[in-house]
Image (spheres, grey):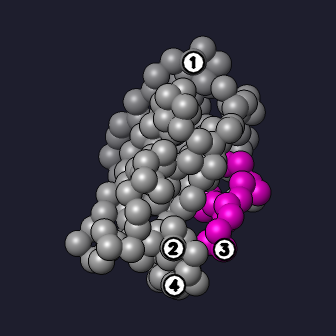
Amino acid sequence: GAAERIDPSSIADVVMIGELGLDGRVRPVRGVLPAVLAAAEAGYQQVVVPEQTAGEAALVPGVSVLGVRSLRQLIAVLCDEPVPDEPADDRGRPDAMLAGLMIPGTGLGAGLAPASPRGEGHIPDLADVAGQLRPRKALEVAAAGGHHLLLSGPPGAGKTMLAERLPAVLPPLTRQ
């Protein structure tokens, strides 16, 4: 097992974030960005996160990020062995576009897949929405004033369509 192959002192300065499933897969968790920010402030320079959240973790400057799909991949990287190919598991993957994390080109090392939020490319624009005057106005006011916004209504009312267009109204993200 992993306990026999890895010297605990070699990972003493590494922060590991994620949920380990019974099948050995590393599953994404919420709050990766604040956790990595806290690790960086505490002086840690290396973090291991689920591959699906590596793009989010890579936003923190000065921290080396390794995204893994499974415990087997992590052990292989730590032992300088060939990295086994693991099937992708998109269950639980955060919606990067709605989280405001559409930053293409964020990459990783160690021969693993680069961090790439799904949905790269065209960001839907609020100008595409016909009608919906009051919800559009609420979205614009919330975005301009930095206010919270709750979208509620029956299925098909347009909540998701409006939420998908919110990033087009917001100013570009900075690293802060």
User: Which one is earlier in the sequence, the residue at label 4 or at label 2?
Assistant: 2
Which numbered disc covers residue 111?
A: 3
Residue 115 on the magenta segment = yes
- For badge 4, the amino acid type reads Pro
Q: CA distance from mark 4 to mark 2?
A: 12 Å
Of residues 93 and 52, the one nearer the viewer is 52
Give the SS element for disc 4.
loop
Q: Above or below — where is 136 with respect to 51?
A: above
Which numbered disc covers residue 146?
A: 1
> Residue 94: x percent and y percent?
47, 54
- For badge 1, the amino acid type reads Gly
Q: CA distance from mark 1 to mark 3?
A: 39 Å
> Residue 18: x percent and y percent?
38, 54
Specify whether 25 is left or right of 32. left
Which numbered disc covers residue 79?
A: 2
Residue 103 on the magenta segment = yes
User: Which one is earlier in the sequence, the residue at label 2 or at label 1?
Assistant: 2
Please say if the residues under marks 4 and 1 sit with CB atoms less than 8 Å apart.
no
